[in-house]
Amino acid sequence: MAAPKDYYKILEVDDKADADTIKQAYRRLARKYHPDVSGKAGEDKFKDINEAYEVLSDPKRRADYDRLRRGFAESQSRRRGQGFERVAWDWPGEDSGGFGSIFEDLFSQGHEPSRPYSQTIPEETVRITLEQVARGTTVALTVQDVRECVVCHGRDRNCPRCGGLGQVSEPRRFDVTIPPGIEDGDVLKVGDHARLKVEVVPHPRFQRQKDNLIGRLMVSVPVAAVGGEVPVRPLFGEEIMVKVPRHSNHGRMLRLKGLGLPHRGTSVKGDMLLEIVLRFPEPFTAEDDAMYEQLKNHHQEAGGEIHAPR
Ligand SMILES: [Zn+2]
């Protein structure tokens, strides 16, 4: 039997960590291991982080998980103490399509008193990237689907298929289409009963504001002073050259029309908004220093006004 994954260890938090701490740890690690930043190498780690957060951020799932984790630790120490003891738990593998989407199944298969069928409305959560929001995507989802018994239609109390309940619960696989432009927290209906909640993972370069993408654009001081072009990597696709107007101050916003996200259900696209952040070019040579010294002496204005923080 495989040990349950240590979700606390994956998120680098204590097993008594509160919801806020867990959320912060998740955001930090999701940025660090986002495939956009760490590439192929970080992919498995990124999946683990998302799976761990999916469970630990949900109080009920976290409680279930804590119970399972404690149970496993106890069974291990019993095993060491008195020889063998078979434990029936099995841990879901990696091949589950969505991140950890079969976690619920694990608990509905006999590890807890089973819930009455009629109360089971399977709801799953899937986490997708901003890139997937832009293009739309498809996720494979397996849910316990409750259907009327086709053998007896609820009319045979001794029915071998449903045991007289009139309905059977069985895993059903769906390929769920997630349309472009979906919002964080949107819920999609799957089949007759199931629901799929979509969450969008934080992106290392862009923040989403409805259909717009917001980022901070590093621009060197000389380019901002006299104007020029800088290469910019959009959400995906090839680099584009973005024009920086002359005399661009720190904080100036550039709007790139149509480079945002699609508005759900339409062909309209939002914009990319880039806030200019001034940076000195590297390396900054002694010659540069001399030229800037000259510039400084050339100008009357030295700054000195105070503004309250934004
Ligand atoms: Zn039946």
Image (cartoon, grey):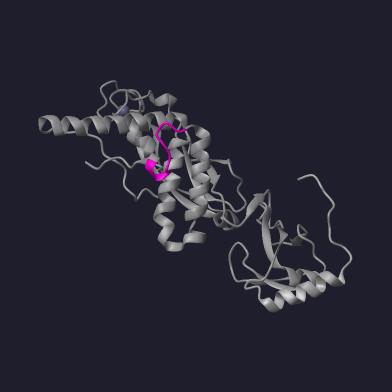
Q: Does residue 130 show up? A: yes
Residue 243 place in picture, x, y as percent: 75, 71
Residue reaching furthest right? 300
Determine the quadrant in which ligand 1 lies.
top left
Task: Reply above or below: 39 against 160.
Answer: below
* Displayed quadrant of residue 155: top left
**Residue placed at 87% from the left, 68% from the top?**
299
Residue 7 place in picture, x, y as percent: 38, 41
Q: In which quarter of the image is the C terminus?
A: top right
Residue reaching furthest left? 83
Q: Main SS type for the magenta part? A: loop
Residue 20 place in picture, x, y as percent: 53, 35
Q: In which quarter of the image is the N terminus?
A: top left
**Residue placed at 54% from the left, 44% from the top?**
199
Q: Is residue 13 magenta?
A: yes
Span of residues in magenta: 9-17
Q: Does the magenta stretch include residue 131?
A: no
Q: In this view, does 71 lie to the left or right of 191?
A: left
